[in-house]
Image (spheres, rainbow, N blue to C red):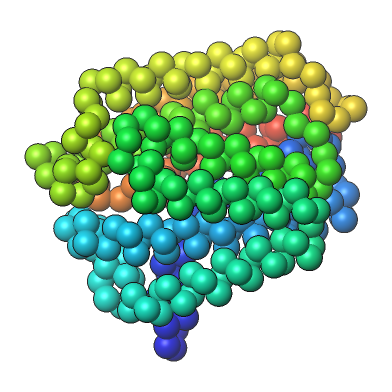
Amino acid sequence: MIGPIGPIIQAMRPHQWVKNLFVVAPLVFAEQALDAAHLVHAAAAFLVFSVLSGCVYILNDLVDVENDRLHPTKRFRPIASGALPIMTARTALAVALVGSIVASFIAFPTAFAAIGLAYFTLNVAYSFALKHVPFVDVACIASGFILRLIGGAVAVSVPITPWIFGCTFLLALTLALGKRKHEILQAGEKKGEQRRVLERYDLGHVKLAMVGLAVATVLCYVAYTIFGSAAGRLFHPRDLAWTIPCVIFGLFRFVQLTDRAEDGRSPTDLMLRDGPFLANLGVWSVVVLIVIYVR
């Protein structure tokens, strides 16, 4: 693309915006996804969080630019490679951040804008301090997913159950620990050069915690299907029992992907390119939609 627009968009990592689908989850499980007005609001909320997360990625790349230049794949990112000048990146960050917050105040309840600000503030604290504290950094990443979930519920004024909170938080912790495990394996003896906090992690502890959280995620999901109550009126979570094998396989496959230290891409990138994982995710999504909206 002509000028800095292409590198700016690349720095905002649109391929990672799939994580913001958690914003839409409350709408789906509240049985409101067929409501046109709610669907438009959810799509707008997804867009706002995508811009906000893009701002976070630019901020992270600005803070980590020297370390990224030592990384086998991160060195090709626009800021680290020099394709996007630092001053241009700062300007783009300011414009995108102010624009997304202003749009939040105009289009949504004040609470949604507050959640968006909280999400960005959390990530500022993460970028400058908390990412250097082992396990606290993982909790920050997981909290970002919870804020997406709450923001989606506020945007369309639908309730979310504690079970959805629990499953989301445990899943996010598992994904974040998987990312750390992959980084430790990939960096080897140079882990301190690429990310300072990796020196303070013990690989054995990370693996154990990750497996434990994966099991806890499955158990929480199973408990949701047994004891949970629906946020809507037409389906009961017990009907989602058919999707339990998909959850088990998806987590098992993610654990496998984090062992691919020879691949410089993050576990998220690997998931988005892994046929078995994507097929499993597709089956889970179809079954969930059938249970909630067809039956």
Residue at image coords 36%, 51%: 128
Q: Which x, y percent locates residue 139?
A: 45, 33
- Between 199 and 2, the one lying in front of the other is 199
Give the left or right position of residue 255, taking residue 21 as reference. Answer: left
Splitting the image into 4 quarters, where does residue 226 fall?
Answer: top right
Q: Inspect this view and state whether residue 130 appears.
A: yes
Residue at image coords 85%, 47%: 34
Give the left or right position of residue 205, taking residue 54 as reference. Answer: left
Q: Inspect this view and state whether residue 14 appears.
A: no
Q: Which x, y percent locates residue 288?
A: 70, 32
Q: Which x, y percent locates residue 174?
A: 44, 29
Count of number-bearing discs: 0
Residue at image coords 42%, 64%: 58
Q: Which x, y percent locates residue 223?
A: 65, 12
Q: Pick the quarter of the image with the N terminus.
A: bottom left
Splitting the image into 4 quarters, where does residue 59 fall?
Answer: bottom left
